[in-house]
Image (cartoon, coloured by chain):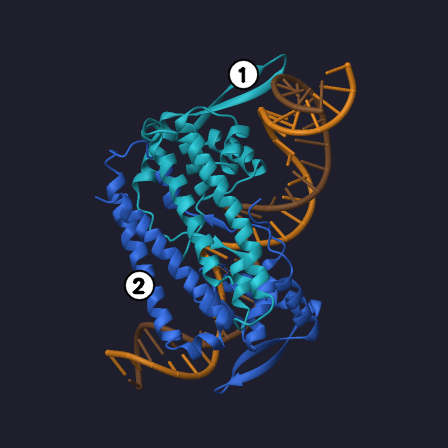
Chain colours: A blue, B cyan, C orange, D brown
Amino acid sequence: MIIGQRNRLQYIILGLLNQRPQTGYDLAKAFENEIGEFWQAQHSQIYPMLKRMETSGDITHEDTVTGEKLAKKQYSLTPAGHDKLVAWVSEPSPELSATKDEFILKLYFIKTAADPRLQPMLQEQAALHRAQLAHLKQRRETVFPDQAAINQAYGHYLILDHAIGREQYYVDWLEKFLR
Amino acid sequence: MIIGQRNRLQYIILGLLNQRPQTGYDLAKAFENEIGEFWQAQHSQIYPMLKRMETSGDITHEDTVTGEKLAKKQYSLTPAGHDKLVAWVSEPSPELSATKDEFILKLYFIKTAADPRLQPMLQEQAALHRAQLAHLKQRRETVFPDQAAINQAYGHYLILDHAIGREQYYVDWLEKFLR
DNA sequence: TAAAAACATGTAATTAATTACATGTTTTTC
DNA sequence: GAAAAACATGTAATTAATTACATGTTTTTA
């Protein structure tokens, strides 16, 4: 089954806004950073979704001005939106995660271990994933320097930890086949 | 950046058809089984794509009949299609894999380790991923009973091995937080 | 032998997602 | 003080993907 798409984006946005009121721009940044390992969305998908969600009554916004005239919209949850978020978190998640990995697919079409393309391909990916792993570890050090920081954003710690472990596995797996 | 969508589906189909001529139905099965861990596509996406690819001259089909009148279309690569496949495999894969994982996102919104929802959520996912892990291991036993089988479809072995390791990691990670 | 499951192929409607277009402000860096 | 980068918000066009609609055959199972 893998994963359908029953507007999961809205729930993720609800969750993000529950942490603190944010602008669409802030949300887009979250999808590039802390959330991006597990869900992706561009600003062109986020802004229209915010409008839809406001129309449905799950969020509202407050206009603020930065500097002389830069208009921002700080979105926050309504009680209805909060209820919706709580319901979503509590309901079962019976679907496995969906991964799209072009590199692994290419490997599938390599027929023998002796194929001369194999080792360069593995090397290239190893470099890519080592860099990503280093980046994630760096982020963990910055964001969670001590136990107090972990306790204050436990969910965030969990998913960063998961992402690091996953990336470590990817690197280890690649190295298993490198010569 | 993660992953754009420059019609990667076509390349995967080329790779599958390069192994042996197949019908659209066969391809759809491949996306449910050996490929499904790393790319997903429904038959409603596959059949139109086959038409497009035939129009572009990358594949052709041969009509065959099973039994009395069941018409099948066996698709196979043209030389142009084969060239396209080789070029795709050889070119770099600079993008990281994209994962969508609703469960991990829910975790992100759990604020403390003491949240009463956390443990049941972890239990539910552990059950799901243990089952998936068992299923994948079973498949490895069936499909790759000996070294000869591995050598004959090395790429297939690689990705199944990767999928098993990934799933094992997921289970281990969940268990790390279970009490 | 009847029913169910699997095989087989398509299209239509809708939703999701990407890429490109479009504009302007504020802050930081050189 | 100029330029670049980051902040900020949108829409339009296109492509990708899902879900639903639609139909028929063959094989397996009870």
Residue on which the image places disc 2? A134
Chain hosting mark 2: A
Q: Position of residue D20 (x, y in %)?
A: 70, 42
Q: Position of residue B22 (x, y in %)?
A: 48, 25
Work out whether residue B9 can be spotted: yes
Q: Position of residue B7 (x, y in %)?
A: 45, 43
- Residue at 48% x, 63% y is B177
Residue located farthest toward the left when viewing the structure as drawn: A179
Q: Secondary structure at mark 2?
A: helix
Q: Is residue B121 above or below residue B113?
A: above
Q: Secondary structure at mark 1?
A: strand
Q: Is residue A53 above or below residue C11?
A: below
The quarter of the rendered structure image containing the N terminus of chain B is: bottom left
Front in this rendered view, residue B134 or A121: B134
User: What is the distance, in whole Å, between disc 2 and disc 1 at their CAs?
Assistant: 53 Å
- Residue at 52% x, 26% y is B23
Give the left or right position of residue B141, taking residue C14 as reference: left
Task: Tell me whether circle 2 and circle 1 mark residues in contact (CB < 8 Å).
Answer: no
Asked where in the image residue A160 lies, by quadrant, the reply is bottom left
Residue on which the image places disc 1? B64
Chain hosting mark 1: B
